[in-house]
Amino acid sequence: MNEIIWNEKLDFLKAIRTGWCNADYIEFLVEKVWKINKPVNILDFGCGFGYVGLLLLPMLAKGSTYTGIDFSEILLTEAENIFDESGYSTRFIKADLSEYMPVETYDIVISQAVLRHIPGAKDILEKMIQSVVQGGLVICMEGDLEIEKAGQYFEGLDYTELDIPSLHRKMFRKELLDGGRDYRFGIKIPVLMQQLGLSDVGVRMNDCVKFINPFGDKDVHEKQYNAIVKAWGWDKKISNQEKLNLINTFIQRGLSEEEAGKFVDGQIKISNYAREHKHSAFIIQAPCIMISYGRK
């Protein structure tokens, strides 16, 4: 992973997590599925700006603590600022997960949208298991990009015709074959958890579906629309030079020149559609994020 790249991702990470989950469902998991009813110490692998801490700490018993690990100085600084006057007990550690060696153990070790970005993610999962106490809980909230890229709908735009999921698949497969990230790692996690010795392994799915509804609550629509177009860069027009640069990038990632042109044209169509139809466009994203868990 590249620290410089992720140092520039703060706005993206905040935007992409707008409406990422329904808090009531996560609360259901905490209370009814994981049965967390006493103070716990949490370690968050790849914490970013501390989203998981913001999500979980209000649901947990008083006295719970949150420790986050990330290698981005900017994201960690943002996390420290966010929690500075929160009243919660937090700590943030700067470390590359690929090099990090577990020292302390925690009641819960968790990752959220991290493992699919790391080559050799199984090694990171093993470190998560090493970092949890006996009887403790390992939780991974991770997506399967095969499912995620297919789970989109734009009213008035034929997303299927753009063939974007299959072109993504070709690039992701090449990356995996070249020793890079595993774009389907999320769906493999429960199997790996069982193979690595965890017990009571289970899988749930994030029930949140993003529904950008221009005819619903105006304030909600404004927030959701702005977040989604910013997260995916749909708020900006692509210049001819930027288009050529993108085509060359996707050729390097495994597409033919024709495929790369088709892929970029598809992204431009989506961007133009979203930008030009702000007040009429229905957009649905159903990422189907897997929530896998097991006990040591």
Image: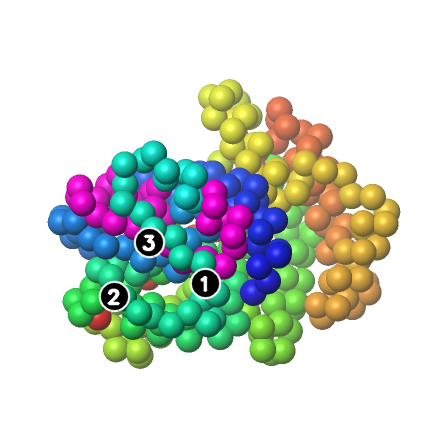
The answer to whether residue 293 shows anywhere in this view is no
Q: Residue 156, how many percent across, how many down?
A: 65, 36
Residue at point 65%, 67% (across, down):
171
Q: Earlier in the sequence, mark 1 or mark 3?
A: 3
In the rendered structure, the answer to whether residue 16 lies left or right of residue 200 reads: right
Rendered image: mark on residue 67: 3
Q: Identify the residue position indicated by label 1 in the image.
A: 95
Per the image, label 1 sits on a secondary structure element best described as loop
Q: Are marks 2 and 3 in contact (CB under 8 Å)?
A: no
Residue at point 31%, 69% (across, down):
103
Q: Residue 81, how many percent across, how many down?
A: 43, 39
Q: Is 119 or 8 nearer to us in this picture?
A: 8
Number of residues whose C-alpha sits closer than 10 Å to that of mark 2, classed few (under 14), some (14–19) or many (20 or more): some
Per the image, label 3 sits on a secondary structure element best described as strand
Q: Earlier in the sequence, mark 2 or mark 1?
A: 1
Q: Identify the residue position indicated by label 2 in the image.
A: 105
Q: CA distance from mark 2 to mark 3?
A: 11 Å
